[in-house]
Amino acid sequence: MDGRVVVVVQAAVNLLDLAGPVQVFDAAAEHGGRYRVGFVGVEAGVVSAQGLRLADLGPLPDVSAGDLVLVPGTRLDARGPLVDPRVVRWLRDVSGSGASFAAVCSGAAALGEAGLLDGRRCTTHWELLDAMRRRYPRARVQDGVLFVHDGPVSTSAGIASGIDLALSLVHRDHGSAVTAAVARSLVVYLRRPGSGAQLSPFLQHRSHVDDAVHVVQDHIAENLSGRHTLADLAARVRLSPRGLSRAFTAATGITPLEFQQRLRLALADDLLTATDLPVSTVASRTGFRDARQLRRLYRARYGVSPSGVRGRA
């Protein structure tokens, strides 16, 4: 995508639905992600569900392929229209533009009213699931998940899961390394999966509170192509090699060497699936001794050879 994130701010917007994903995209931009966030609405100013007035919103714009339209959730009022009809009309008008659409929590109602959920898997806050099934019978409403991607349309469950949704979109756009940097920046070390997908190794093993181990993990993640002895890593945090090994295993359940190998394989997998680089080049960029070592470890980890991933060796 070219990086434009169009945030549709409606009256009675929930602040965390708005701020959480926006913070993720802003942090991603600081770490090399191509995101430009803009705030729009049918009025220049609205009052949030929590009473904070938000002003200087731009008008609902034209969008195109590469844009992401993000609809944070609102406090729904059953006494009136679920969604401002002007927002619904705009969403219908731009639905064929090639843009992607994402809704947080009750923001899914806007996509539902515009017909964007028809035939698609989607989710929302657990309290709204039954009502969503009744109102949008053509939508394939999922429960027990934090977020769902179905083609160009993504939806998330309640409130804080918008952060998980945004992290997953960053991962889709820019891969594991940028996502891991964002998660570290926001102190969201454990990215929760949307619908059972395995966590990225860059984000696994980060739900502990051992600062020394986090420093070592950060150093490994940011310098994957380098050589790291246990003694060098231990010196970085002023521990003995034995002390670091003990602390690292207690905090993460794996050794520093295994952590490094998992990250290298994850980055190699990203490069193999997203680029046409030869396996030898991928091996060099990800810190493996040579293509033979990468092939052996890749097959052991994923059950296929690198050539089986994208048809070349």
Image: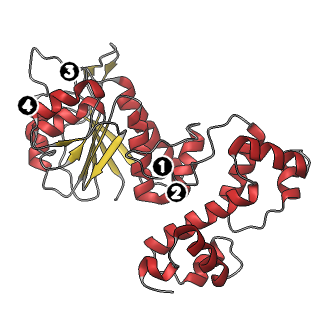
Q: Gap between marks 2 and 4, in whole Å?
A: 39 Å
Q: Identify residue type, mark 2.
A: Ser
Between 177 and 264, the residue placed more toward the observer is 264
Horizontal side, residue 255 vs residue 103: left or right: right
For mark 2, does the 10 Å Cα neighbourhood hold few (<14), some (14 to 19), or many (20 or more) residues? Answer: many
Q: Residues within 10 Å of mark 4 (few under 14, many from 20)?
A: some
The residue tagged with tag 1: helix, strand or loop?
helix
Residue picked out by circle 4: 85
The residue under label 1 is: 29
Q: Nearer the viewer, mark 1 or mark 4?
A: 4
Q: Nearer the viewer, mark 1 or mark 3?
A: 3
Q: Which residue is mark 3?
A: 76
Mark 2 or mark 4: whose residue is earlier in sequence: 4
The three-letter amino acid code for the residue at tag 3 is Leu
Residue at horizontal 22 percent and vertical 47 percent from the top:
121
Residue plotted at (49% across, 48% down) = 28
N-term mark: 1 or 3 = 1
Which of discs 1 and 2 lies nearer the camera? The answer is 2
Task: For marks 1 and 2, give the CA distance.
Answer: 15 Å
> What's the residue type where badge 4 is placed?
Pro
